[in-house]
Image: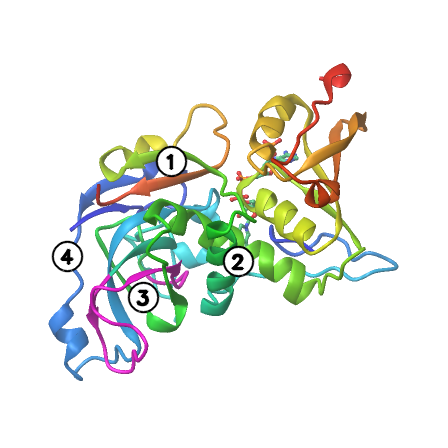
Amino acid sequence: MTVTGPPEARPAHGLAVDFVVVSVPDQLGEIAQRVRDGRLRTNIGHVAPIDDAVAALNPTQRVAGKTIIHVRP
Amino acid sequence: MKAIVVTDPAAGTAGMKLTQRPDPDAARLASLSGASYGDVIVEVHASGFTGNELEWPSTWTDRLGCDRTPSIPGHELAGVVTALGYGTTGLSVGQRVFGLTDWTRDGTLAEYVVVEARNLAPLPGDVDFTVGAGIAMTGLTAWQGLFEHGRLRAGQSVLVHGAAGAVGSMVVQLAREAGAYVIGTGRTDHRQTALTSARTCSSISTTMPWKTSAGSTWFSMSSEARSRSGPPAWSEPEEHW
Ligand SMILES: NC(=O)c1ccc[n+]([C@@H]2O[C@H](COP(=O)([O-])OP(=O)(O)OC[C@H]3O[C@@H](n4cnc5c(N)ncnc54)[C@H](OP(=O)(O)O)[C@@H]3O)[C@@H](O)[C@H]2O)c1
């Protein structure tokens, strides 16, 4: 299973699947429910306002977790 | 409205600029004069950007193959619906929503974005906008890889490359909840960061020390912690740190 583009070589005895995610409201609901009840922990790293977004999205070192831009404070 | 735009495919993220772009036209959306069936306008509160978006052809070209610069990147959002087009049953003005937006349309690094209603889900009142924007891409990608395309069943093993990444950490947690044995990988020179990050998945306990094989750092996790009571434990792989 890959999300970074089609595999360079097909496995000899297996199946390679590459896909692009789609927005599915029911699944978003399942995911949000898991966050609410603690089954799923988010991995949010740096949070920056939109005025600082260009710098936040051009990090000079690796930042762990997902960078989120706050457009409205 | 304020927006981040990109105009040069060769410039990468360094070419991002904060600028002013026209607000989406709510009057046109509400009238039947434009073919905006199914679209809503969302006031963006939190936006997410995936690292290599500027390499996606859809950032630069629309479905007809036309240049769409200046293009607004960021296709993950949480916000509030401010206007409805025709055919958006199920959503209302003032509703909190989250989801992903079409790759070939202007994105969410902006004060407002036009989104197809079918791409949005209600964001529960007790989940912040930051979290909503942070779980849409990562959660959906993990969910679809594991359950739709992978048809994961309890007892199977899942190897997660980049397990400490944004998508990877979701894959690890969802796979474990589904009863899989999960093995995650991260880069050797980043193992400390990777472990710190994976630790945010507090229900994971390492059952094996780190092993280095062919330049990769491997750690292995099991679903044991689920059956324990009390706060989930994480055992440090001290010797191999
Ligand atoms: N097809 C789709 O629908 C879809 C959807 C979402 C994301 N994606 C893609 O999925 C990938 C991950 O996205 P993300 O948001 O999770 O990114 P991320 O948070 O930056 O995570 C990337 C992960 O890859 C690892 N990594 C990076 N370079 C590596 C290397 N040279 N060797 C080994 N591991 C390496 C990192 O390891 P360390 O932790 O060791 O640094 C990190 O864990 C991206 O390519 C993204 O475009 C695709």
Residue B178 position by quadrant: bottom right
Q: Please name whichever residue, A6 or B31, is drawn nearer the observer in this view of the structure.
A: B31
* Whole-percent x, y for residue B1 in the image: 15, 51
Q: Secondary structure at mark 2?
A: helix
Q: Which residue is mark 2?
A: B140
Give SS at disc 3.
strand
In the image, what residue occupies the spot 46% across and 51% down? A36
Q: In front: mark 1 or mark 2?
A: 2
Mark 1 CB within 8 Å of ligand 1: no
Identify the residue under disc 1.
A57
Camera-nearest label, 1 or 3:
3
- Chain under label 2? B
**What percent of the width, then of the height, locates residue B85?**
23, 76
* Same chain check for tags 4 and 3: yes
Ligand 1 placement by image quarter: top right
Q: How is the image coloured?
A: rainbow
Mark 2 residue's CB less than 8 Å from ligand 1? yes
Residue on which disc 4 sits = B22
Mark nearer the N terminus (4 vs 3)? 4
Q: Of the residues shown, which amino acid type is indicated by label 3?
A: Val
Q: Is residue B49 magenta?
A: no
In the image, what residue occupies the spot 68% across and 42% down?
B161
What are the residue bounds of the magenta stretch?
B81-105
Q: Residue at x 62, y 52 (%)?
A: B174
Q: Nearer the viewer, residue B72 or B157?
A: B157
